[in-house]
Image (cartoon, helix red, strand yellow):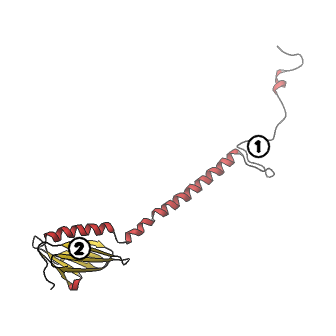
Amino acid sequence: MYSIGVKRRDVYHTNCKKSRPYAFTRLRNGEQGFTLVQALWQLQLFLFLSFGCVLIFSTAEKALPFEEINRFSQMEWKQTVLQLDEELSRATAVRSVQGGNALEYVSHQGRVITIEPYQEMLRKRTDQAGHLPLLHKVKQFQVRTSQHRAILKVTDGSGKVHEAVFFTYKGVVPKS
């Protein structure tokens, strides 16, 4: 089994050392290039910063709809029109007051209800006590009554005019 004059450990043993960079070693000052780990680290840093920027921009973009809070709401207008239509159809008397700047009607329960502008909103008052906001961001409000109908004109903050016609079945009281 043994060869004459050659030891087994001399066959596998060598004194030659290669100087090549490994994945986890740093390059010396004179050498150029990247190791695989350095390239992956730089890629990970780049992706982290890129996704961070995308997240910040998407958050800023989602904040823009909050500007619509300061605008006149069409949904709120439709809800107000439906509510007033129901109440005015059951009212016993309807009239415009304050020179056409407010609507006053007597409900089927005998209460006097006033729809009038207040600051930048349209409010509903019952028997001149307290108020319930109906419509926000209102610039101007006008009411006209004639025979069996009441016409409301609302001007929003941008100057757009919204108009609604309500039919009253029990009649309109002449202007006071």
Question: Seen in the image, is 168 located left or right of residue 37?
Answer: left
Residue closest to the eye, 170 or 155:
170
Disc 1 designates what residue? 21
Helix, strand, or loop for circle 2? strand
Residue placed at 40% from the left, 68% from the top? 68
Q: What's the CA distance linking mark 1 and mark 2?
A: 86 Å
Residue placed at 82% from the left, 28% from the top? 13
Q: Quadrant of residue 165?
A: bottom left
Q: Quadrant of the N terminus?
A: top right
Is 68 above or below relative to 119?
above
Query: Residue 84 in the image: x percent, y percent?
Result: 21, 70
What amino acid does circle 2 point to? Val
The residue furthest right is: 5
Is 92 above or below relative to 9?
below
Disc 2 designates what residue? 165
Q: Quadrant of residue 8?
A: top right
Helix, strand, or loop for circle 1? loop
Query: Residue 28 in the image: x percent, y percent?
Result: 78, 49
Question: Seen in the image, is 115 located left or right of residue 49?
Answer: left
Residue closest to the eye, 161 or 10:
161
What amino acid does circle 1 point to? Pro
Query: Residue 17 in the image: x percent, y percent?
Result: 82, 37
Which class describes the residues within 10 Å of circle 2: few (<14), some (14-19), or many (20+)?
Answer: some
Look at the numbered discs 1 and 2 and tell me whether their residues touch, using CB distance below 8 Å: no
